[in-house]
Amino acid sequence: MRRLLVALWRALRPVQTRLVWCLNAKFVVGVTGVVRDDEGRVLLLKHRMWPPGRQWGLPSGFAHKGEDFRLTLVREVKEETNLDVAPGRLIMLNSGLRTRLEVAYEAELLGGELRLDPGEILEARWCHPDELPGDIQPVCRPLVRGETTV
């Protein structure tokens, strides 16, 4: 039986990728950045679309198809705040959120003038890690403290 399955799989070589794609779960990828300034403060944003009482969080957004996740971070921070960042090390990789994969990177502030996208962001502030707002998204606290999950 095993030999038959191996032979069948080999015969399907021209369509293997498509078959695997059809048989497996599809995910959207949310990318988050822990952006720190020279003083060690973290950039927090109050997101317009997030649930009331949990609107404060880190810069984040969804990856476009085929986009490198580090470039997603650079793009999202630029779109939401007009700031330029350089992605650092991967600090979180989390699946199991239905069809969503969460990725987070540290990020270094390179420059730019803070200018918010009013369609997405209500407010921004730089916070010391021990002075986070009470209504911040729960996943953000360990990321800000440097507790990695990869």
Image (cartoon, grey):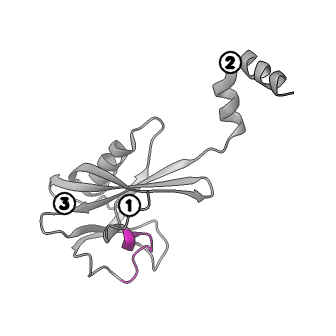
Task: Using the image, determine if residue 28 lies above or below residue 148.
Answer: above
How many badges with numbers are in the image? 3
Q: Earlier in the sequence, mark 3 or mark 2?
A: 2
Residue 30, given in percent of the width and then of the height, sits at: 46, 53
Q: CA distance from mark 3 to mark 2?
A: 51 Å
- Report the side of 24 relative to 139 (left or right): right
Secondary element at image label 1 = loop
Q: Front-most of 1 and 123?
A: 1
Amino acid, disc 2: Arg
The residue carrying pointer 2 sits among few (fewer than 14), some (14 to 19) or many (20 or more) residues within 10 Å by Cα, namely few
Give the residue number, with chain letter if any, for mark 2.
Answer: 13
Amino acid, disc 1: Glu
Q: Front-most of 34 and 124?
A: 34
Which residue is most to the right?
A: 1
Give the residue number, with chain letter if any, for mark 1.
Answer: 120
Residue 113 occupies quadrant: bottom left
Q: CA distance from mark 2 to mark 1?
A: 45 Å
Secondary element at image label 2 = helix
Our reading of the magenta stretch's main secondary structure is loop
Secondary element at image label 3 = loop
Residue 27, given in percent of the width and then of the height, sits at: 58, 47
Give the extent of the magenta segment: 134-142
Give the residue number, with chain letter if any, for mark 3.
Answer: 114
